């Protein structure tokens, strides 16, 4: 099964996402595999058995969002220079979204840009992070504030890698699938409500549908000048949550789940979403044990965190909100008081008011 990523404006090369078609990889160059200890222990032997290249090097970096930083990038670059990789060399990102983001960023800056291939091993990275060419790292000011658009040479999605995935990681990926459905496809959302994604056939269909949706969006707007920003539904809130909690309390998808509920509550207060729709989205997230509530200790400080988001321009916050299931609205003129009122209620565990 294949999903094509074709750009309307040829600023980047087209490429293909291969689903369950990883049988062999042959490269007439040096290759460096960037991975983490957990993924290496589980799956590296299999990948090496499928890979042919002039020389193959393994670069292992620490696992987790807190390590997606300049120090890790410097470590990877130092290894690339020590192994004498060049402009014809290729990197393989073998792990989740953290590994994919960092590998892509290193590929974009090493000798002004080399090729890389994505082989994502988590559900979240398979349905979202590995496709579209967003690369980057975090710093003290926020998430993914340092990075570049750099498209992979190819993406290989293998469902077998998910067999060893912990349930929290599985749920984190579901959050990104729900994100696609809420903003782009009401029929898909209704299907998700009725389909158990622990069933392999259902999961394969959800992955394919999510990838087709993202492929269409990215092909329309590679550099996030308009439509692609909708894929950040829930993320404006999530990035503040992740920064406040030091990237240690929540997995990215868990923070996105909370962020979607916050966005839904804001949409409800503005009349774009109904109470019933808020409850339906929250119920679907809860099916996969995803959190939807986060107690904000200082709503003013949380609000200020929005201004470090990449979608904020000229001190104006751009919110991506659902406008009914399967549709969206991008809005910039939300009164601060309205946002603060919603934030103050988002940590409550009671019924949606």
Image (cartoon, helix red, strand yellow):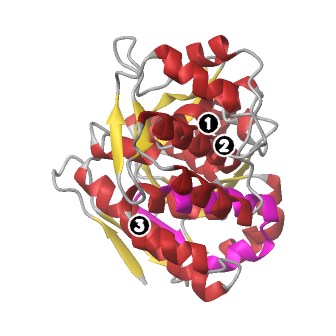
User: Which quadrant would residue 204 be assigned to in this image?
Assistant: bottom right
Q: Is residue 83 visible?
A: no
Q: How far separated are the C-alphas under marks 1 and 3?
A: 23 Å
Separation (CA) of disc 1 from disc 2: 7 Å
- Which label is found at residue 238? 1
Question: Number of numbered discs present?
Answer: 3
Q: Secondary structure at mark 1?
A: helix
The residue to which callout 2 is attached is 258
In x, y percent, where is residue 267?
A: 46, 39
Which mark's residue is nearer the viewer, 1 or 3? Answer: 3
Of badges 1 and 2, the one in the foreground is: 2
- Tell me, yes or no, whether the highlighted magenta stretch contains residue 139: no
Q: Nearer the viewer, residue 216 or 21?
A: 216
- Residue at 59 percent across and 83 percent down: it is 202
Per the image, the residue denoted by label 3 is 186
The answer to whether mark 1 and mark 3 are in CB contact below 8 A is no
Image location (x, y in percent) of residue 211: 43, 67
């Amino acid at each position: 099964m294949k999903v094509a990523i074709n750009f309307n404006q040829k600023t980047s090369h087209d490429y293909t996402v291969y689903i369950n078609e990883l049988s062999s990889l042959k490269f007439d160059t040096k290759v460096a595999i960037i991975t983490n200890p957990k993924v290496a222990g589980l799956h590296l032997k299999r990948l090496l058995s499928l890979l042919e290249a002039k020389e193959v090097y393994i670069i292992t970096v620490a696992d987790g969002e807190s390590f997606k930083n300049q120090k890790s990038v410097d470590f990877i670059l130092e290894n690339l220079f020590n192994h004498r990789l060049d402009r014809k060399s290729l990197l393989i990102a073998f792990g989740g979204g953290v590994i994919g983001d960092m590998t892509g960023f290193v590929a974009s800056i090493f000798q002004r840009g080399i090729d890389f291939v994505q082989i994502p091993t988590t559900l979240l990275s398979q349905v979202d992070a590995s496709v579209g060419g967003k690369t980057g790292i975090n710093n003290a000011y926020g998430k993914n504030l340092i990075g570049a658009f750099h498209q992979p040479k190819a993406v290989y999605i293998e469902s077998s890698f998910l067999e060893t995935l912990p349930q929290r990681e599985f749920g984190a990926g579901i959050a990104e699938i729900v994100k696609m459905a809420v903003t782009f496809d009401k029929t898909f959302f209704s299907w998700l409500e009725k389909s158990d994604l622990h069933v392999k056939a259902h999961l394969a269909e959800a992955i394919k549908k999510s990838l087709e949706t993202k492929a269409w969006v990215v092909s329309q707007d590679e550099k996030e000048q308009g439509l692609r920003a909708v894929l950040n539904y829930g993320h404006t809130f999530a990035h503040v949550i992740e920064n406040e909690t030091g990237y240690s309390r929540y997995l990215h998808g868990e923070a996105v789940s909370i962020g979607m509920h916050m966005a839904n509550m804001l949409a409800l207060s503005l009349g774009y979403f109904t109470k019933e729709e808020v409850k339906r989205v929250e119920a679907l997230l809860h099916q996969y044990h995803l959190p939807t509530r986060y107690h904000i200790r200082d709503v003013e400080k949380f609000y200020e965190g929005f201004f470090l988001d990449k979608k904020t321009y000229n001190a104006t916050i751009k919110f991506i909100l659902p406008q009914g299931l399967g549709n969206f609205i991008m809005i910039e003129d939300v009164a601060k008081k309205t946002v603060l009122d919603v934030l103050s209620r988002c940590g409550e565990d009671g019924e949606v008011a």
